[in-house]
Image (cartoon, rainbow, N blue to C red):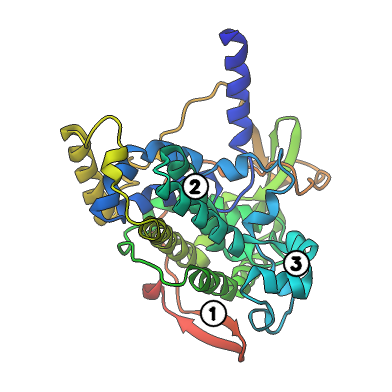
Amino acid sequence: MKKTLLPLLLAALVLASGTAGAWGFFGHRTITQVAVYELPASMQAFYYRHMTELVRQSTAPDERRNDDPTEAPKHFIDVDHFSEDNPFGKMPRQYEKAVAKFTADTLQKYGTVPWVIIETKNKLTEAFRQRDTVGIVTYSAELSHYMGDAYVPLHTTINYDGQLTDQKGLHSLWESQLPERFINDYKLFGDEAKYIKDPLAAVWTVVQESFGFVGETFDRASKIEKTMKPDVRFTFSHRYGKTTRRYSDAFADEYEKAVGGMVSYRMKMAPTMISSLWLTAWQDAGKPNLNELMHLGRPTKVEKEKLTVELAAWKANTLSQNQLLLAQQKVKKIEVADEIKPAKDMGAAPKEVKEDEPAEPAPEAEPAPAPVVDKMKVKTKSAKGTEKTKQKASDW
């Protein structure tokens, strides 16, 4: 029986690694790990004891998307469907009011991530109240995933993959290919967790900020496309009997120079919000003693020393360089090597791949020089209309 199940489990892991989702598996797992470092001491020992499982489960929502038809809408909200000029002025923050205005079916079609975050936070609060260790780990991981999704600009627009502007593949490029390729350049050190008085308002603020970056996400890609020929811009990859097109490493390098500061900034901010939601759920549950839930006892000397090393690396921004990210510690898989060639060597372009098919994960590569990013215009839409602001790379 065990010999039969092992190949099946390995195959499932391989397939899961190609499933599409915000930040990709690498990004979600990195964000979740960093969130543990931002917790107060009263929570950190428990979360660090379970960090490996937290990181693993942080991608569970993406892994079940193909089997659960109700899962996909939980990861996004296409706010520009409801209004191109003033979506945040027309969209009610409360779910019941949004349903009354737009219907539940419409919300399911165009995404429910803000309310799913709050629902998951409430489940985590109840798990703390019940002193349910399994529930605490599960809901903490899933809360990390959904909140991380809200930090991706392309999870706030109907043009989520550039499919409406002939830029299909931009989603995977932004959230997976760039972080995996340039993680050594990204700043992961953030602020400590803080109690959030109004979680729903805080979540909507994140969504609005993400939507403010949408324009630049597409515009900066367009500028590169004007000077880079298609045969250099794209590569075709054969995987699992299918052929998919993705942006090339050459394009990724240029795009990183243009928007890398934005990607790094959103990846840096997400863990702070996640750890703050964990803290909020814990406090709302009455601050149960988490040390009592560690069945193997308080942290050992080895655990304390290991955490000290990782916290120092996190503050020095050397987690990636020191190979301390759990997302970097991949299990080697036995599989046929993929055939990847430049577009000009592949002949005619293949048929378009359906959106529900697994996305091609970005290949690993040597770190590139740190990106140089100039000022970026960010549009923020509110009840008063559209406001334009400029952010320097130092603000990211």
**How far apart are the alpha carbons under marks 3 and 2?**
36 Å
Q: Amino acid at mark 1?
A: Val
- Mark 1 nearby-residue class (10 Å; few <14, some 14–19, many ≥20): some
x 64%, y 32%: residue:
15
Q: CA distance from mark 1 to mark 3?
A: 20 Å
Location of mark 1 (residue): 378
Q: Is residue 221 visible?
A: yes
Would you say 101 lies left or right of 134 here? right
The kind of residue tagged 2 is Tyr
| In the foreground, 236 or 113 | 113
Element under disc 2: helix
Above or below, comparing residue 129 to residue 258 in the picture: above
165 on left or right of 333: right
In front: label 3 or label 2: 2
Spot occupied by residue 350 in the image (x, y as percentages of width and height): 81, 43
Taking the spot 31% from the left edge, 59% from the top edge, the residue there is: 189
Q: Quadrant of the N terminus?
A: top right
* Marks 3 and 2 close (CB-CB < 8 Å): no
Where residue 295 appears, x then y in whole percent? 30, 31
Residue indicated by mark 2: 139
User: N-terminal of the two: label 3 or label 2?
Assistant: 2
Label 2 environment density (alpha carbons within 10 Å; few <14, some 14–19, many ≥20): many
Q: Nearer the viewer, residue 183 or 196?
A: 196
User: In this picture, is 102 found above or below 72?
Assistant: below
**Chain-order first, disc 2 or disc 1:** 2
Tell me residue 254's x, y (percent).
Answer: 54, 61
Query: Mark 1 or mark 3, which has the lower sequence index?
Result: 3
Q: In front of the other: label 1 or label 3? A: 1
Report whether 378 appears left or right of 103.
left
- Give the number of the disc on residue 165: 3
User: In the image, what residue type sits under mark 3?
Assistant: Thr
